[in-house]
Amino acid sequence: MSAVKKVPERMCVICRQMKPKNELIRIVHNDDVVVIDKTGKLNGRGVYLCKCKDCINKAIKSKGFAKQHGFTLDSVAQELENLIEQ
């Protein structure tokens, strides 16, 4: 008898909705570098965002995001927008 594997869920930091981990984008802040973590295994403080335009645009423009998480998304903004368009 095989057990059904549970899919881990994470919360989007903007819309606060719980979604399966594979439906979110993980952004990692490590050693003053902000990187989009495509593998989900990079070291560093990570936050999750939905793959929707609204959440990503709010995160890029929000001063509260930068204040709360300690980093801005300016360096990866273009890459995030490219991920949405795909």
Image: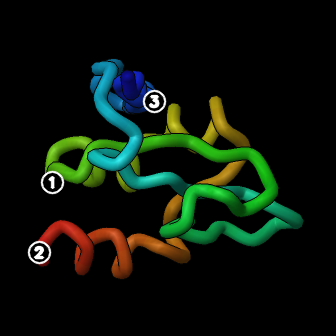
Q: In the picture shown, does residue 31 fall above or below 66?
A: below
Nearest the camera: 54 or 26?
26
Q: Name the amino acid, label 3.
A: Pro
Residue 29 x %, y %: 72, 57
**The N terminus: image quadrant:** top left
The CA distance from mark 1 to mark 2 is 9 Å
Q: Is residue 19 above or below residue 79?
A: above
Q: Residues at badges 1 and 2 in contact (C-beta under 8 Å)?
A: no
- State whether residue 54 is above or below residue 37: above
Q: Nearer the viewer, residue 65 or 50?
A: 50
Name the residue rendered at 35%, 80% in the picture.
78
The label on residue 85 is 2
> Dot 1: what SS?
helix
Q: Amino acid at mark 2?
A: Glu
Residue furthest to the right: 31
Vertical relation: 37 (above or below) 22: below
Query: Which of the pair 63/58 is nearer the observer?
Result: 58
Name the residue tied to disc 1: 53
Relative placement, left or right, of 59 versus 73 is: left
| Number of the front mark, 3 or 1 | 3
* Residue at the disc numbered 3: 8
Q: Point out residue 33 in the picture as x, y percentages from the top left corner.
A: 75, 71
> What is the distance, in whole Å, between disc 2 and disc 3 at their CAs?
25 Å
Which image quadrant: the C terminus?
A: bottom left
Determine whether the residue tagged by mark 2 lies in a helix, strand or loop: helix
Q: Position of residue 2 (x, y in %)?
A: 39, 27
* 70 lies left or right of 15: right
Residue 66: percent from left, percent from top? 59, 43
Query: Which sits earlier in the primary sequence, circle 3 or circle 1?
Result: 3
The residue under label 1 is which amino acid type?
Lys
